[in-house]
Image (cartoon, rainbow, N blue to C red):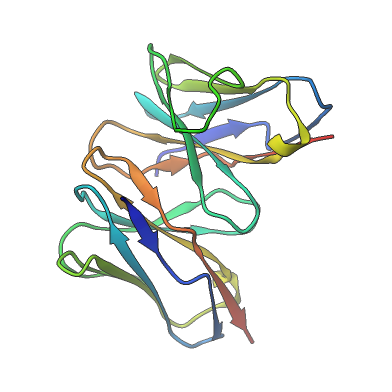
Amino acid sequence: GAVVSQHPSWVICKSGTSVKIECRSLDFQATTMFWYRQFPKQSLMLMATSNEGSKATYEQGVEKDKFLINHASLTLSTLTVTSAHPEDSSFYICSAKPGTGVTEAFFGQGTRLTVV
Amino acid sequence: GQNIDQPTEMTATEGAIVQINCTYQTSGFNGLFWYQQHAGEAPTFLSYNVLDGLEEKGRFSSFLSRSKGYSYLLLKELQMKDSASYLCAAMDSNYQLIWGAGTKLIIKP
């Protein structure tokens, strides 16, 4: 299957700093990438849909100024958690689909963010 | 509204068979996905159903009934490594995945 690479796998940062997470599709072009967060023992919660060359579409309740998404190319999307706080500590996962319509979503390895 | 329901947790014995059920309500329907997720890892794709019936893939099979809004994942010859969460996700008319909360499967020797 297609490969999606997400970095870093884990990061610890101080409260008030910003953290950037990268998501790359290695062997396919992804017009659309998705960013999720997952709290322990809970399911994936879609944060935003990232479209190459345009602004991301954020889900209700997700602060766009806090979670900055950039999808500068067909193979790279980044999520920046700005002014991170301990409550932002979570597992962040990106996924990408090759093409549009009904296709399998491929997931990155996930990023465990801990804000201290 | 859109909703996916699946049991929170199930326990089964190594070598046995287990069926994980999922019911869904979505705005439009473009198929039902099952993913496996081990703790601390990202989900991995298991199966996709869009037509009624059973799809078999090795030890794993997935069933869909569109009229009932129902799917199940069947795992045979359970192995300890099958201990994981199993996520059911329905794709709506906008091709968005609506995720269930996941079923944590515990395998006992």
Q: Give the residue displayed 82% in from the left and 26% down from the top.
A: A15
Residue A114 relative to residue B79: left or right: right
Residue A90 relative to residue A22: left or right: right
Q: Inspect this view and state whether residue A106 appears.
A: yes
Residue A42 relative to residue B75: left or right: right
Q: Inspect this view and state whether residue B61 appears.
A: no
Residue A83 picture quarter: top right
B93 above or below A40?
above
Residue A106 picture quarter: top left
Q: Quadrant of the C terminus of chain B?
A: bottom right
Residue A11 picture quarter: top right
Q: Give the residue displayed 76% in from the left and 30% down from the top.
A: A85
The front one of A19 and B1 is: B1
Q: Give the residue displayed 33% in from the left and 72% down from the top.
A: B72
Q: Give the residue displayed 69% in from the left and 35% down from the top.
A: A88
**Rendering coords of residue A93 (x, y %):** 55, 39
A5 above or below B61?
above
B1 above or below B57?
above
**Rendering coords of residue B90 (x, y %):** 31, 53
**Rendering coords of residue A23 (x, y %):** 54, 28
Residue B24 relative to residue A60: left or right: left
**Rendering coords of residue A54 (x, y %):** 38, 13
The front one of B22 and B108 is: B22
Instruction: Count the numbered circles shown.
Output: 0
B68 above or below B14?
above
